[in-house]
Image (spheres, helix red, strand yellow):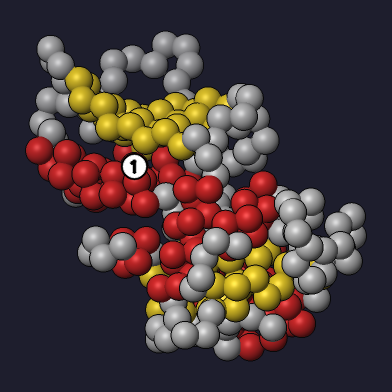
Amino acid sequence: MTALRVCIAGASGRMGRTLIECLRDDHRLTLAAALEPAGCPVLGQDAALGLGTPLGIAVTDDIDHALRQSDVIIDFTRPEGTLQHLEACARLGRAAVVGTTGFTPAQRTELEAFGQRMPLVFAPNFSVGVNLLLTLLDTAARVLQEGYDIEVIEAHHRHKVDAPSGTALRMGEVVAQALGRSLSDCAVYGREGVTGERDPSTIGFATVRGGDIVGDHTVLFAGTGERIEITHKASSRATFARGALRAAAFLAGRPPGFYDMQDVLGLR
């Protein structure tokens, strides 16, 4: 079977380098292109970027050239750049796996619309464990919907630029949907001063940023006399990279559509 050709966007970033490293061990996929924006200091360098044996692929800022060498792009960059990459994918008939977070509501609508033009997997977190946890949260929320206060606590490294994390927001969305609520109506993102008693219909979020924390997420169901905590802790970005590669392989031969990891893992 011919390996699926992959373009990695943000090739010199933390996730980009992890994806390139994990690609070496995945027989279903092969690195075909490495992409960075104009002005990036690694342009023209070998895509291995010090990870070992040179790959013979130069990092480029030419999105059309990169996509013509590829079947699918994997993008963990920033919303503006991701949307530009997706426009090129739709124009050239390529598939995409997107793990970028921090989209505004308008950008999220634009992102979803690309699913009508191309096969696209979007997930705020590509960890298999996290996506299994989302299924567990749906069950927990339905069972614990009366008498339990719900809080989402997340922690990431000091370099993360958006908060709460996309994963934390997705967890909140799953819980809210299970309870028949809209997260936009019941989320509380900060508490300070005299806040009054907690509204039992709300879902609270707490954010920690520091050091090199890869990603910790806990959903707390606090009742009277007991509390249930559902937690996922990531110790390596490789878990996200392997999930993204699995999503890329899933897209081979798929029709246009807006897919997520629940589709990839057969959990839906």
Q: Is residue 235 left or right of residue 84?
A: left
Kind of residue indicated by mark 1: Gly
Please name the residue shown 55% across and 44% down the image: 237
Categorize mark 1 by other alpha carbons within 10 Å: few (<14), some (14-19), many (20+).
many
Q: Position of residue 102 (x, y in %)?
A: 57, 50
Where is residue 218? Give x, y as percent: 35, 31
Answer with the quarter of the image where residue 232 lies.
Answer: top left
Apparent side of residue 80 relative to residue 254 in the rendered image (left or right):
right
Quick one: 39 or 32, which is closer to the camera?
32
Residue at 78%, 63% (x, y): give it: 54
Mark 1, residue position: 172
Q: Is residue 98 above or below residue 249?
A: above
In this image, 40 relative to 106: left or right? right
Which quarter of the figure has residue 46? bottom right
Total number of numbered labels?
1
Which quadrant is home to the C terminus? bottom left
- Could you tell me residue 130's position as x and y percent? 36, 46
Residue 96 in view in this figure: no
Front one among 10 and 52: 52
Q: What residue sits 10% from the left and 38% below the top?
A: 143
Residue situated in front as seen by the camera: 132 or 124: 132
Where is residue 153, by image quadrant?
A: top left
